[in-house]
Structure formats: C-alpha cells, structure tokens
Image (cartoon, helix red, strand yellow):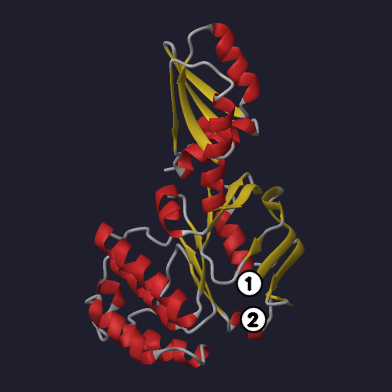
Amino acid sequence: MIRTENLVKTFDGVKAVNDITITLKDGEIFGLTGTNGAGKTTLLRILAGVLRQDSGAVIIDDEPVFDNRKVKESLFFVPSDLYFFPNSSPKDMEEYYMTEYKNFNKERFEKLVEDFGLGMKRRIQTYSKGMKRQLAIIIGLSAGTKYLFLDETFDGLDPVMRQAVKSLIAENMSDYGLTPVIASHNLREIEDLCDHVGLLHEGGILLSEDVYDMKSEIRKLQCVFPTDEEQRKAEKILSVLNCKAEGRLRTYTVRGTEENIQESLKEIETVYAEILPLTLEEIFISETEAAGYDVRKLILD
C-alpha cells in the first residue's frame, strides 16, 4: 500500500504539490488527473522516489521511498519524457534492466517486443514516438515489480495499441499482483481503466474517490415542471450541485443515488423527469464548480 501524508513540494516559490494526503490500495488502478500544471507529474515523481518532498511523507509498504533501494526495487517508473541509452536496442535495455531488477522477466519481455513488432536488435532511435512509448511500457511490465508508475501512459499510442496496453496492464494485475498508478490528462482513459481517481488542481487534491462510488452517488436529472413553485420546491429538496436551463427544461447535477433521487421526486410534481448517468468529466466539472473554481480553466481533454 502507498500512503502520502501532507506532501509539499515547491519550485521557485510555487507549490507544485500542496499538502496532499492520499492512500493507494494494492490491487487497484489509481488514476491521477487534473489540468496542466496541476502537479500530476511532480506527485508521481515523488511517489516513485525520483524527487524528494520538501515536507510530509511517502510511505510504500510501511517504508519511506526516497533513497530506499529496497522500496525502489518494488516499483518501476515510466516518465512522460522517455529516455533510452544512445544507439541502444531493446536487447541493450533488457541487459541493463536485468541488472537493476532481480525479477525482470526476460522471456516475457522478448515475447512482447516481438509481438509488438519492435525487433530486439533494432535501434530505438529509429522508432516512432508511439513505438518508444510501447517499449517503455513493455519494460515496465516486464520488470517484475509490485508497483508501476506511468506518466501519460497512452501519449502517442493509436487506438489499437491503447487497447493492447490496457489488456497487458489487466493481465499483469491478475497474474503478477501488479498495482499501477497512472497520471493522465485524458479522463476517458482514466474512466475506462481506473478503480480510484484523484483530481488535482494547483498542487492540491480536490477529490480522491472510487470511480464506482463517485458515479453511483452523482446523477444528472432532467426535469420540466408545471409551475415555478414546483421548480423551487425541487431545488430545495434535491442536493443540487449545478443547474442548466434550456427553455422550460432544467438539467440538474444532483448528489445522491438513483434510489434517493427517485424518492425525492415522489414529493415533486413534474411534467417530465429522467435520471441519467454522468461521465467522469461531467462529475469533475460539477465538483469543481461546487468548490468555487473557474470551470472554464479546468476543462479536461
């Protein structure tokens, strides 16, 4: 298990990570998302022990991570800015990582390299951006670590390769007990893949919740009311996060389960009422609006 306690990291007087306390459970995929400059990469680098926090703590399996070789042997970090040795091939990278990770799975690595058509002896400098990303992920999945940290996992991958990587991550979780932590600005990828999501903004964490719970506890409600009085009554009874009006149609984002909302609707007279699910993007926009942030600056891709 990974825990952070009141993490703070400052660069040139700006708090890139500001008092973050979260828990990442084993066996779940944790997604970090947020706007550009929200602190995703900095937080991931602190979790991986690449950066030292100014204050607070990162605890992985009951031990601090920074300058702790034992803990670092249990994790692998794939950064957004990939690096490979000059003029190296996958074979060269395999030989290096086998010296760094005692559980590196040579057979699995070579099979995946060939399955992805990368070529064990081909020079990595001839690869496309997407191919380099594929190789980096394959190395991470072959390292035999308990934790895998991925920054902008799907950047440069085409849709087919994205699905292949998702399948490989799921396979490693099932077969090898892997716990992935993924930082991405792409909410659709996060929604499809992750069990738990943390939303960052200006170095702080606005939300950290299970995706299932989040989606089951907030709903979209579309209503047409016979009178203004019934509309006002509904807005008092329901836990409304925001409302949009198009003519007589009111579209509410409402906190509560579908059952709770249906019970509330029994007390309200409507011409039309329909409860709809929300996407993760819609939930985050609603939550950030409720927290008083300028949503126009927080729209995620």
Instruction: From this view, report whether residue 89 is shown above or below residue 293.
Output: below
Q: How far apart are labels 2 and 1 at the CA level? A: 9 Å
At label 2, which amino acid type do we have? Val
Q: Is residue 121 left or right of residue 57?
A: left
The residue furthest front is 266
Q: In the rendered structure, find residue 133 and report the number of the disc placed on it.
A: none
For marks 2 and 1 on the same chain, the one whose residue lies earlier in the sequence: 1
Q: Which residue is mark 2?
A: 71
Q: Secondary structure at mark 1?
A: loop
Mark nearest the camera among 2 and 1 is 2
Residue 49, label in figure: 1
Label 2 SS: helix
Q: Quadrant of the C terminus?
A: top left
Residue 203 drawn at (x, y percent): 65, 49
Q: Is residue 287 in view?
A: yes
Q: Label 1 is placed on what type of residue?
A: Gly
Q: Residue at x 40, y 49 (%)?
A: 188
Q: Nearer the viewer, residue 192 or 182?
A: 192
Q: Residue at x 37, y 58 (%)?
A: 155
| Above or below: residue 23 compared with residue 275 | below
| Left or right, 28 with reference to 136 | right
Residue 53 appears in the rendering: no
